[in-house]
Amino acid sequence: MNKFLKILFSILLVLLFETSISYSEETKIKIGVLVPLSGENASLGKQILNSIRMALVDIKNNDIEIYPKDTKSNPDVTLSSALEFEKMEISLVIGPVFHKNLLFLDKVKNITFLSLTNKTLDLPKNIISSGINSSSQLNTIKKFLEKSEIKKTIFLIPNLNYDSEIKKGIKESKIKFFRKYNYDIDPTKLTKQIEKITNYGIRKQNLLDEISRVENSDHPNKEKIIENLEKKYTLGNVKFDSVIITDFDESLKSVVTSLLYTDVSPKNKYIITLNQWFDESLLKEKNLQPIYYPSINKQNLDEFNDKFFKKFSYKPSYLSLLSYDLIGLIYYLSLKNEDLEISKSFKTQNIFKGKIGVFEIRDNKINHQLNFYEVKDGRLKEIF
């Protein structure tokens, strides 16, 4: 009898152990990671992978497992890696990084991809754009315009491959504007276009006409009046009170410089642009200031960069912070939607607060509630 009980007890232990293992495996959240791990963008892929691993350590949860695969920044390789994930029954993937690598992923029906791209046009239903998209930025700019009671805004949009994204963002944000202009980034053409937009020729002629009129007048203080007029570049105001320039780097600086040339100064008109990722070169260009833009929270970014540097001894890109937050978001959704498959949670509306700021999942994209900054007198100031 004792022998029988021992055998029965052993069988029960084995069954209990196997059930425990099975249950543990079922509760694991398997996440694929599609990033460039070889080729010219390998360093970026490594940064993203390191930030994901850092996030896993920080949330102190062993239920999330990651499975990295290389895209080689190639759409065909990306598809091949994604199909391997599908065979592994992985239903949620962080990546790819670049929009071009989304090309064939609509063929992988059983996976939801959290792409790091900020482009949102023509995305397949299984792709969720998680980058800082134009709608998020323009919603933040809209908030600033309303708080500052700015009424007449013009948009300056470069003739580049992202102009359709900007126009979509304008439409979705329902931002009010006075006029919208496209411009050529070629400096030889740009200045002439800005002259036309600002009515520079007419305002310049107004000044010359006024000087001539005073010279021919009998005004007792005409010498003083003429002296003051000759200090001006134009006479007469433009029909807008703010300019939103949807550009970056040197091209952005060229547009502001052209505005200065046509006597439209940042000191008199609001110069607003898109997320500049705290470009330090803007701090040095005091003649272009003040200039305003939306961005992620600077303090959170600095803290993340410091932490990352201490761990890996090099500075990360902003995409590293984005991928770090995605792990936190996945973990949050796994706790909030216990009865729902985690990949399906991204199809429902959710709000999550991460390092970047507040995420809002809606319509196959992640919108971000951003902060707003002013660069003035060589310093960066948070407006809200």
Image (tube, rainbow, N blue to C red):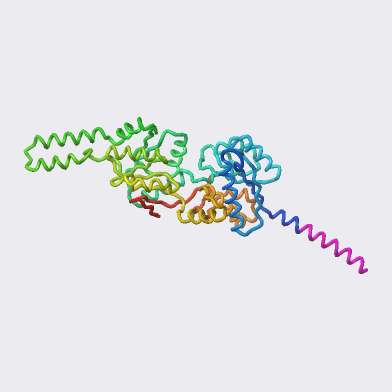
Magenta segment, prevailing SS (helix, strand or loop): helix
Classify residue 73 as left or right of residue 230: right
Q: As displayed, is residue 16 above or below residue 288?
A: below
Q: Nearer the viewer, residue 97 or 146?
A: 97
Where is residue 367 shown, x and y percent of the image?
50, 48
Quadrant of the frame with the C terminus: bottom left
The residue at 37%/45% (across/down) is 272
Residue 157: say if magenta.
no
Q: Position of residue 361 (x, y in %)?
A: 53, 49
349, 43: nearer the viewer: 43
- Residue 10: image quadrant is bottom right
Whether residue 350 sits left or right of residue 241 in the image: it is: right
Q: Quadrant of residue 105?
A: top right
Residue at image coords 46%, 56%: 299
Name the image quarter holding residue 236.
top left
| Magenta segment boundaries in residue numbering | 1-19
Residue located 16% across and 36% down the image: 210
Residue at the bottom extreme, as displayed? 2
